[in-house]
């Protein structure tokens, strides 16, 4: 890569950081090999985390982006059939769904635990299974497939309107291959892997919101080593041909988490994505960007998170944070407070990027084992992490609100994008009229919602 390009890129990034401008200059994927941000974070310290800005400045940039990308300001205009304005009409705005999904990791332990099921369904609209869909789980021994747990978990999710990501069709890490898979000759491996793809994708075709096709394809290369460098692109093609309408994801760690990991930096990610799409037959694939977001191996760098998400957003694909957790050095004093503090900053920064369509927390209740962090204890009572998630869930929804129209029959309201039921009530007669509507940046171009009520 040319030095001049690195230089230009650095200048861009410096300008962005200094001006606090949240729009990154357009970057041509073809020109970039190294993505760099000035390193500012030196330790677990609030001052370096936000530096060179204050926490309030970060918050106000984030709020501005949320207002632009996640919320829509609407005018509800209430009239009588003769077109005169209704003054003082009560307008009830009820949010039915949100375009943004809160998700949580799920394991088979949920299946026999009614309280856990209720807890999960009351909070989350998305799920990612920890292991139950993985090849090693469904076919531990050759030819002995068992989808009992995955079937039951997907049925549970369906019953409660929870969308599920298919994690994962294949995994490129040698560590997670069954013993019998590791022993196969390349020819037999291709046969076995194709059979695996056909089996799991045909089984759940059309029922999932996305597939991780080749997990951790940037850090690992089990399949490429044995089947050639087009191996992953071929498997994406195979999944696409079976389940063409479902979004196919890459899923990787350390893309936003760690500025020092050269394997999975955002521009490497985009480059691989482009290669997969460029493979013959793959141009029609709906692709998505999966970011594991296992934070904490290094101090957290909010600038890097912002710049990475901004860069990844430029390709216009849905981004999911798929396994978000924050590991804190257990020997640190106040580690619980630090975990919550970092998690909050990561969540706030991630949420303000509208291309982030869902955030999946890894993991939920302590019943599932608190690998790194948990939202609840064994009794399903909140931990500090659980309190934080609840607080942000509340903050990032419109819920139910009630306004009153002014003398022009208008009430102006800013709501989070999603589906709504709106009811206007005549102040004198209580006659009402309702509509349901989809609110987002394109569905209501003039931002006016007209409701007519009888006199
Ligand atoms: C950010 O930069 C863009 C392009 O240079 C400019 O149009 C925009 O006004 C800037 N926004 C802010 C908030 O500075
Ligand atoms: C399949 O998996 C279920 C759930 O883990 C288990 O109860 C059952 O024994 C398994 N079936 C076979 C044939 O191994
Ligand atoms: C990979 O696929 C491309 C595009 O079809 C082809 O030109 C190339 O020869 C393939 N490489 C290998 C190693 O199979
Ligand atoms: C994909 O979606 C389109 C539009 O919703 C539909 O017409 C088509 O039948 C679907 N294809 C498959 C294979 O499900
Ligand atoms: C992420 O990258 C850093 C730096 O290379 C490394 O120390 C860390 O182990 C990586 N994370 C994982 C989960 O491998
Ligand atoms: C730990 O938290 C307490 C209370 O919030 C605070 O007074 C103290 O300074 C913190 N210690 C460290 C090392 O951050
Ligand atoms: C309209 O509803 C309000 C509140 O429910 C009630 O107090 C009032 O009597 C109702 N008016 C008519 C005309 O039904
Ligand atoms: C329109 O209809 C309302 C309700 O029936 C009535 O109060 C109002 O006087 C009408 N306005 C005109 C201009 O007819």
Image (spheres, helix red, strand yellow):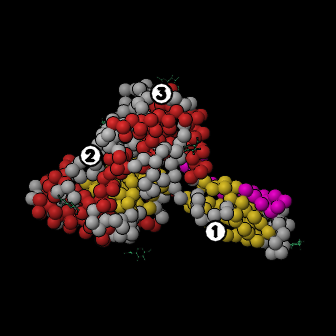
- Residue bearing the label numbered 2: 219
Q: Real-space Cα distance between discs 1 and 2?
A: 46 Å
Secondary structure beneath disc 2?
loop
Does the closest atom of ligand 4 sit within 8 Å of the Cβ of label 1? no
Give residue 417's mark. none
Q: Earlier in the sequence, mark 2 or mark 3?
A: 3
Is 407 in the magenta? yes
Ligand 8's quadrant is bottom right
Q: Earlier in the sequence, mark 1 or mark 2?
A: 2
Secondary structure beneath disc 3?
helix
- Residue bearing the label numbered 3: 48
Tell me whether the residue at label 1 lies in contact with that at label 2, contact meaning CB atoms closer than 8 angstroms.
Answer: no
The answer to whether one can see residue 235 in this image is: no
Q: Residue at x 9, y 59 (%)?
A: 185
- Residue bearing the label numbered 1: 436
Magenta stretch: give its range. Answer: 393-412
Residue 5's x, y, as percent?
A: 37, 40
Is 59 in the magenta? no
**Front one among 129 and 74:** 74
Residue 102's x, y, as percent?
A: 49, 53
Q: Residue at x 48, y 45 (%)?
A: 25
Q: Residue at x 37, y 49 (%)?
A: 29
* Quadrant where the image shows the C terminus: bottom right
Residue 78's x, y, as percent?
A: 77, 66
* Label 2 crowd (10 A; few <14 / some 14-19 / many >=20): some
Does the closest atom of ligand 5 sit within 8 Å of the Cβ of label 2? yes
Q: For this view, does 254 lie left or right of residue 445?
A: left
* Label 3 crowd (10 A; few <14 / some 14-19 / many >=20): some
């Amino acid at each position: 890569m040319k030095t001049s390009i690195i230089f230009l890129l650095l200048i861009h990034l410096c300008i962005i950081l200094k001006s606090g401008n949240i729009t990154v200059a357009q970057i041509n994927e073809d020109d970039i090999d190294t993505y760099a941000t000035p390193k500012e974070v030196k330790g677990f310290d609030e001052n370096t985390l936000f530096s060179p800005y204050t926490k309030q400045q970060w918050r106000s940039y984030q709020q501005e982006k949320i207002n632009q990308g996640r919320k829509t300001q609407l005018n509800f205009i209430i009239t009588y059939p003769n077109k005169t304005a209704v003054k003082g009409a009560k307008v009830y705005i009820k949010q039915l769904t949100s375009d943004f999904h809160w998700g949580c990791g799920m394991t088979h332990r949920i299946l026999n635990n009614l309280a856990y099921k209720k807890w999960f369904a009351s909070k989350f609209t998305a799920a990612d299974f920890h292991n139950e869909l993985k090849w090693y789980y469904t076919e531990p021994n050759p030819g002995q497939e068992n989808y009992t747990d995955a079937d039951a978990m997907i049925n549970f999710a369906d019953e409660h309107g929870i969308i599920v990501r298919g994690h994962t069709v294949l995994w490129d890490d040698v560590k997670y291959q069954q013993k019998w898979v590791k022993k196969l000759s390349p020819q037999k491996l291709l046969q076995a892997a194709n059979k695996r793809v056909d089996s799991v994708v045909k089984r759940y075709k059309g029922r999932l919101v996305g597939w991780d096709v080749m997990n951790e394809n940037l850090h690992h290369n089990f399949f490429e080593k044995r089947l050639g460098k087009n191996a992953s692109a071929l498997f994406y093609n195979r999944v696409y041909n079976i389940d063409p309408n479902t979004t196919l994801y890459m899923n990787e760690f350390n893309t936003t988490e760690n500025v020092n990991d050269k394997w999975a930096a955002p521009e490497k990610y985009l480059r691989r994505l482009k290669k997969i799409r460029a493979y013959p037959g793959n141009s029609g694939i709906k692709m998505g960007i999966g970011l594991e977001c296992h934070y904490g191996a290094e101090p957290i760098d909010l600038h890097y998170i912002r710049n990475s998400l901004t860069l990844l957003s430029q390709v216009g694909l849905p981004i999911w944070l798929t396994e978000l957790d924050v590991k804190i050095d257990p020997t640190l004093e106040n580690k619980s407070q630090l975990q919550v503090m970092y998690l909050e900053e990561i969540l706030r920064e991630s949420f303000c990027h509208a291309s982030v369509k869902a955030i999946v927390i890894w993991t939920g209740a302590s019943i599932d084992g608190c690998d790194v962090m948990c939202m609840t204890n064994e009794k399903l009572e909140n931990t500090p992490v659980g309190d934080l998630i609840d607080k942000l869930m509340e903050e990032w929804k419109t819920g139910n609100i009630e306004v009153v129209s002014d003398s022009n029959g208008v009430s102006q309201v800013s709501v989070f994008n999603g589906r709504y039921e709106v009811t206007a009530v005549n102040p004198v007669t209580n006659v009402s009229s309702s509509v349901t509507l989809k609110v987002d940046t394109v569905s209501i171009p003039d931002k006016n919602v007209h409701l007519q009520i009888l006199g």
